[in-house]
Image (cartoon, rainbow, N blue to C red):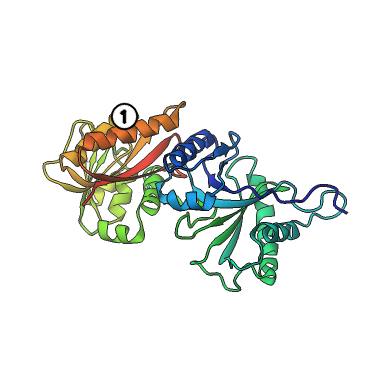
């Protein structure tokens, strides 16, 4: 017989994955943006957990009003519908985690009229969560046929249908949620697994590669990277971001007083200009400007705004290095400053990427 309560807790919430240590920032973002949209609720989280629950009676409507693409500190967005504080039987009997999950779905969602196109069992990207990887894989393999038999999961994976996500907080504590495949990250755990190319001059190349995948859609990448387009890379040395641009067919002016990797210059597609990236500007409009300079975030935001306002570039991707404290406040103030300084209608998207650390990455262009 069960020796603990296996009843699911049905508490609707918007659940977001994030970088460990940035739970307060995501909690503040959820709280502020939900309030601005007229949704009451409160954030539940623990520092270092790698996720935040924003408890809201109408979490589904909040999710629709707050698109994943607009969230800065969230790697993934789920509409959570149940918590399982004890997965199956605890004691001498083998835990029936699969049975507990199927029972929780029936108890909270009713009859299986909503057919999921896929299921993912995941863990938080934390030191405590990583040992759960093997359990997550095994549970996913066992859960898939059980959900199909119960009528919850399509027999052939369907990428256009909602996905069921099971987030393991521990071996016997899980959160169940739904992801709209058109309004969430396509990657497991919200992390694009990119490999370091042996010719990349630095690991910072992974930041820009991830930015292209995360901040731009496929049509934008196709339209905005054409052979022999022109870009500037401010604070380029040793050339990681210049290398990524070059690989996308772009000709690059790499602006930095420091040295560049020799094979960039040898390519014939990169010009090394020894100058201060905060002072130099081009004589004609460039297709792109990118910047990963280590500087005060407000100073960077103001300079990036100048590039768009003066017409020195059509599009930009830049990083804002955040302070150790009040990072959500600094993020809001930097982006507000950026909009004011541009002085024209501007479209921007921002994310804390997996390959970022104490920073966020911003894409921006003038509207129209």
User: As drawn, which residue projects farthest toward the bottom?
Assistant: 155
Query: Does any portion of residue 258 appear in the rendered image?
Result: no
**Front-most of residues 95 and 40:** 40
Is 61 left, or right, of 307 in this rendering? right
**Front-most of residues 324 and 106:** 106
Q: Quadrant of residue 295?
A: top left
Is 49 left, or right, of 74 in this rendering? right
Query: Does any portion of residue 109 appear in the rendered image?
Result: yes
Q: Number of labelled discs?
A: 1
Residue 174 in percent (x, y) is at: 67, 49
Is 332 left, or right, of 61 in this rendering? left
Q: Quadrant of residue 350?
A: top left
Is 125 left, or right, of 209 in this rendering? right
The residue shown at (70%, 63%) is 142
For the N terminus, give its image quadrant: bottom right
Residue 317 in percent (x, y) is at: 31, 44
Residue 179 in percent (x, y) is at: 53, 57
Q: Which residue is mark 1?
A: 298
Q: Quadrant of residue 327?
A: top left
**Front-most of residues 33 and 116:** 33
The residue shown at (20%, 37%) is 343
Dot 1: element: helix
Note whether 287 is above or below 43 in the view shown. below
């Amino acid at each position: 017989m069960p020796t603990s309560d296996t009843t699911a807790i049905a508490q609707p919430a918007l659940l977001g994955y994030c970088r460990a240590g940035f739970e307060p920032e995501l909690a503040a973002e959820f709280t502020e943006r939900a309030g601005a949209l007229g949704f009451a609720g409160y954030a539940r989280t623990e520092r270092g957990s790698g996720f935040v629950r924003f408890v809201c009676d109408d979490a589904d409507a909040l999710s629709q009003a707050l698109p994943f693409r607009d969230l800065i500190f969230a790697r993934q967005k789920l509409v959570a519908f149940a918590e399982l504080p004890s997965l199956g039987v605890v004691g001498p009997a083998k835990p029936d985690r699969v049975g507990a999950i199927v029972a929780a779905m029936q108890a909270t969602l009713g009859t299986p009229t909503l057919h999921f196109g896929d299921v993912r069992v995941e863990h938080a990207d934390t030191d405590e969560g990583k040992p759960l990887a093997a359990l997550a894989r095994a549970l996913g393999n066992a859960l898939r046929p059980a959900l199909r038999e119960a009528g919850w999961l399509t027999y052939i994976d369907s990428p256009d249908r909602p996905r069921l996500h099971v987030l393991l907080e521990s071996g016997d504590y899980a959160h169940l949620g739904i992801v709209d495949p058109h309004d969430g990250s396509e990657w497991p755990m919200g992390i694009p697994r990119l490999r370091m190319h042996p010719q990349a001059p630095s690991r910072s190349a992974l930041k820009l590669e991830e930015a292209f995948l995360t901040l731009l859609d496929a049509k934008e990448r196709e339209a905005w990277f054409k052979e022999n387009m022109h870009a500037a890379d401010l604070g380029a040395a040793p050339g990681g971001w210049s290398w990524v641009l070059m690989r996308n067919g772009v000709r690059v002016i790499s602006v930095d007083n420091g040295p560049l990797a020799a094979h960039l210059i040898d390519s014939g597609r990169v010009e090394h200009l020894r100058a201060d990236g905060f002072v130099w500007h081009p004589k004609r409009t460039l297709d792109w400007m990118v910047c990963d300079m280590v500087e005060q975030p407000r100073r960077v935001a103001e300079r990036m705004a100048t590039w768009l306002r003066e017409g020195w570039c059509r599009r930009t991707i830049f990083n804002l290095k955040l302070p150790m404290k009040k990072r959500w406040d600094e993020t809001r103030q930097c982006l507000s400053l950026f909009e004011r300084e541009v002085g024209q209608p501007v479209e921007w998207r921002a994310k804390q990427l997996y390959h970022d650390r104490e920073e966020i990455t911003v894409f921006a262009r003038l509207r129209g």
